[in-house]
Image: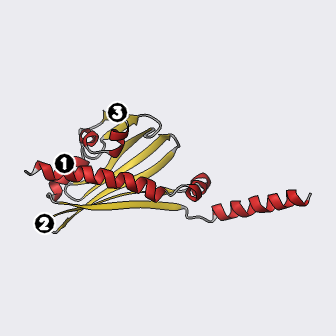
Amino acid sequence: MTLLIFAVLILAGLAVFIASRPAEFRIERSALIQAAPEAVFAWVNDFHRWHQWSPWAKRDPAMQVSYEGPASGVGAIYRWLGNREVGEGSCRISASQPGALVRMDLQFIKPFQADNTAEFHLQTEAGGTRVSWSMSGSNGFVGKAMGLLFNMDKMVGKDFDQGLASLKALAEGEKT
């Protein structure tokens, strides 16, 4: 009986600890790209160009993608269905300010369901463009518990770093 009470207390303490974790998350990475903001913006604002620099496209070259709405900008939609590493979901551009900002509503379906916001902020800096790529959203109880096991900032941040490096190579290569 004492062992059962101890186990219940441990589980209750763990549940309280998990519940006390932050309800919101934000992951952000940035890179300096030696290209004009308008040139970088063209790569980010058009989903048809994403396959050339997206880290997830490299993880699953056979990923199925479809597009809806306008070719680029507000209302453009990108849907994907891929292997276990890239999952399934959609992305819709909700704000687009030429040379400055692209905001997207992300909906993940697999391997887990989540609704997040991704943003690309572009700022002129040192003869180029500082590109900041972020993703933010809410952490439910399961997300908070997963945060104890996996460092999402490092996992997703690594993908952002790879994507920004590919974006940099393409945008800088365009001007030559």
Residues marked 3 and 2 touching at CB (< 8 Å):
no
Mark 3 neighbour density, 10 Å: few (under 14) some (14–19) many (20 or more): some
Alpha-carbon span between mark 1 and mark 2? 17 Å
Residue 18, picture quadrant:
bottom right
Query: Which numbered mark, 3 or 2, is in the foreground of this view?
Result: 2
> How many callouts does the rendering have?
3
Q: Secondary structure at mark 3?
A: strand
Q: Which numbered disc, 3 or 2, marks the residue that appears first in the sequence?
A: 3
Q: Residue at x 25, y 48 (%)?
A: 45
Residues marked 1 and 2 touching at CB (< 8 Å):
no
Alpha-carbon span between mark 1 and mark 3? 21 Å
Q: Where is mark 1, residue-wise?
A: 170
At which x and y percent is residue 164? 28, 54
Q: Where is mark 2, residue-wise?
A: 127
Q: Where is mark 3, residue-wise?
A: 65
Q: Decide if residue 3 is on the left or right side of residue 23.
A: right
Above/below status of 164 relative to 109: below
Q: Residue furthest left?
A: 176
Front residue of this view, candidates 9 and 26 = 9
Q: Residue at x 47, y 48 (%)?
A: 115
Mark 2 neighbour density, 10 Å: few (under 14) some (14–19) many (20 or more): few
Q: Amino acid at mark 2?
A: Gly
